[in-house]
Image (cartoon, rainbow, N blue to C red):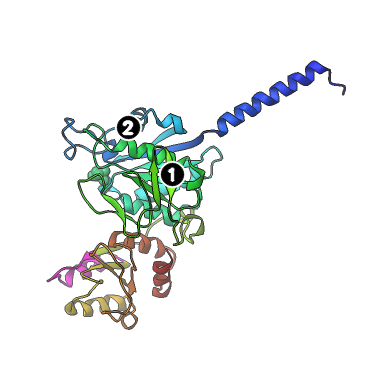
Amino acid sequence: MELTLWKRWLLVGVAASTFNAAAWAADKANVVILATGGTIAGAGASTANSASYQAAKVPVDKLMLSVPELARVARIRGEQVFQIASESFTNSHLLQLGKRISALAKQQDVDGIVVTHGTDTLEETAYFLNLTVHTDKPIVVVGSMRPGTAMSADGALNLYNAVVVAASRDARGKGVLVTMNDQIDSGRDVGKGINIKTNAFASQWGPLGMVVEGRNYWFRAPVKRHTMSSEFDIDKLDQLAPVEIVYGYGNVPASLYEAAAAAGARAIIHAGTGNGSVADRIVPTLQSLRGKGVQIIRSARVPAGFVLRNAEQPDDKHDWVVAHDLNPQKARILAAVALSQFSDSQNLQRVFWEY
Ligand code: DAS
């Protein structure tokens, strides 16, 4: 078919405007903000209330409107998944959130996901997602230590930084990330170490990088298995195994471990003193519980370092597992996910080395 000159120009014009539209759309990533509550959605009575406030009050649309700069870095839309303080998270909240993230990550029109979350259990959720969501798209969990109503509130910049990272191609494939206080931490390593300061979150192995004035600066990458390399898949996970934690201290009674087992625990995380030490008087109880099929996992109440296998405690002899560098609450998450798929201690110890 002979195309007259004006028809050719018309086709070129349409193609160019389509390309421009595509180019325009391509210049901003699509980021979904999933809100779950916490202080970042909190409200205090006055600007002087930096630590006295109510968490989980501000809905996701108001949260996004409170940081108009977000629109400069990404095309954003929000969903209110929960509106709770994160100390109230349960295993079913984790599963519901993880499945929603997995579904969104499969969508072509989603380039990154931000989860706004309370800080109390943020590290548990971030690690859970790191273990179970199969995507290399950035998933960034963010919270704040002060409510948005307070002087020098930290939530707005934390949220801005989270959207910057979630919109960034260079954040892909690094596992679940946490942006607090200008740092980019691995969801695996990060923990809340201070209960009332804005620099509350840290990783004993250091942050992966920093995000400053809308730009990411990377200094290291995770070495443990996560997201796409994980054998655990949220889409095939319908419940988490019951795993409980018993805090170790002088005079701790054996009855606490027995009570956890009686409540149905398939594993008990021993948050031991020192290097996950076990008091002599407790050993027979743990041996008896192990004999009944309950897994015993030695973690430590000490915040840094890692629990050494067969150091002071003969783990091989007792068939116990060590949690390596995972704190008790993260060890619970890994054990709860792993025991939903297998129950032998050899595999269980393997995953504590690998994840
Ligand atoms: N209660 C805390 C929580 O929801 C508030 C916070 O620090 O986010 O985790």
The x, y position of residue 295, in whole percent, is 33, 72
Which residue sits at x=26%, y=79%?
312
Quarter of the rendering occupied by the N terminus? top right
The quadrant where ligand 1 appears is top left
Residue span colored magenta? 246-265
Q: Is residue 91 visible?
A: no
Determine which residue is flagged by label 1: 216
Q: Is residue 131 visible?
A: yes
Determine which residue is flagged by label 2: 59
The x, y position of residue 162, in whole percent, is 39, 41
**Type of the residue with mark 2:** Pro
For mark 1, give the secondary structure: strand
Q: Is residue 73 above or below residue 217?
A: above
Which residue sits at x=35%, y=33%?
60
Q: Quadrant of residue 253?
A: bottom left
Q: Residue furthest top?
A: 6
The x, y position of residue 138, in whole percent, is 47, 46
Alpha-carbon span between mark 2 and mark 1: 28 Å
**The one of 87 and 111 positioned closer to us in this rendering:** 111
